[in-house]
Image (cartoon, rainbow, N blue to C red):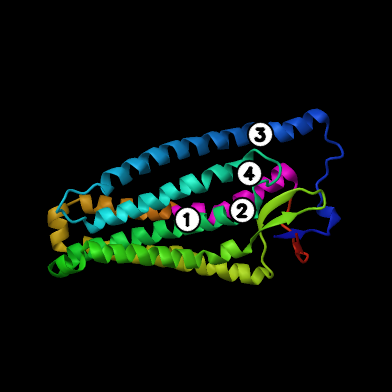
Amino acid sequence: MELYYLNNRSEELNFSNVTEDDSMKLLFGIGTDNFITLLIFGLIFTLGVLGNSLVITVLARSKPGKPRSTTNIFILNLSIADLSYLLFCIPFQSTVYMLPTWVLGAVICKFIHYFFTVSMLVSIFTLSAMSVDRYIAIVHSRKSSVIRVARHALIGVIVIWIVSLAMAAPVAYHQNIVLRSDNNTYCWEVWPEQKSKKIYVVCTFVFGYVLPLILISFCYAKLTRTSVYEEERGSHGNQQLLGIITDVDRFSPVYLGEKRQHHKLLRNRFGYTPPRPLAKPQTL
């Protein structure tokens, strides 16, 4: 196990003026802001688990002899990704708001940030696949019966997961435990060069958000121009377009703000700033 440590004593936490009551509050009290955040986490967790579990239960059941539709397969995959994130990431991430130091170890530190990125990419790529699927069904309706089959949708889902797992791999590699001179540990990204981190962030943003959004916008723009689509769906088509783009757009603040919000939390609660530059790791 590798622990990164800081040599810059000017960045050390200062607890010299903290009273015993303040120490107890730091350890066991989480403050109003963090309490509200935890309540929101709990609400999202509860509603998310119940909602996605219901969707998975309904879609997983198929009548004998009736093939699964491609749309249902993609929706099922979307729910599985969301439910997995809720179960495997949210409970561990909530500890950041309750404890003054990271206590869950390096494996969980790497896993939750890795799987957060994986689930985000899976969700966005699945929404993109759904837009392409709908595009084929309406614009190329004559060929849709051959292309839009369950087998192709399942292959698409497998490809989505493989690509997402591969794209998120650098997150798992560079997420490490940072050990400070006060013996407090933090789960933080450790990149040998900031340039490498910026390149990865830009590439992930482009391939994991910008291009999928362009693809979705293109597909539904073509749909709205199709006379058959307009006659059969009417205004519902525009509502569907707005709904899909809104679903994708909601990932933008999550993706861009997750690291920044975590950084802000550490700085405000613990006076902690990410190590820059980093010393060489110690092997335990």
Residue type at tag 1: Ser
Residue 109's disc is: 2
Q: Nearer the viewer, residue 158 or 193?
A: 158
What is the C-alpha distance between the residues marked 4 and 1? 22 Å
Q: Nearer the viewer, mark 1 or mark 3?
A: 3
Q: Earlier in the sequence, mark 4 or mark 2?
A: 4
Q: Which residues are magenta?
A: 251-271
What is the C-alpha distance between the residues marked 1 and 2? 23 Å
Mark 4 nearby-residue class (10 Å; few <14, some 14–19, many ≥20): some
Q: Earlier in the sequence, mark 2 or mark 3?
A: 3
Name the image quarter holding residue 201: bottom right
Residue that appears at 36% across and 49% down = 79
Residue type at tag 4: Val
Q: Decide whether residue 16 is among the magenta residues.
A: no
Residue at mark 4: 96
Q: Earlier in the sequence, mark 1 or mark 2?
A: 2
Residue 252's disc is: 1
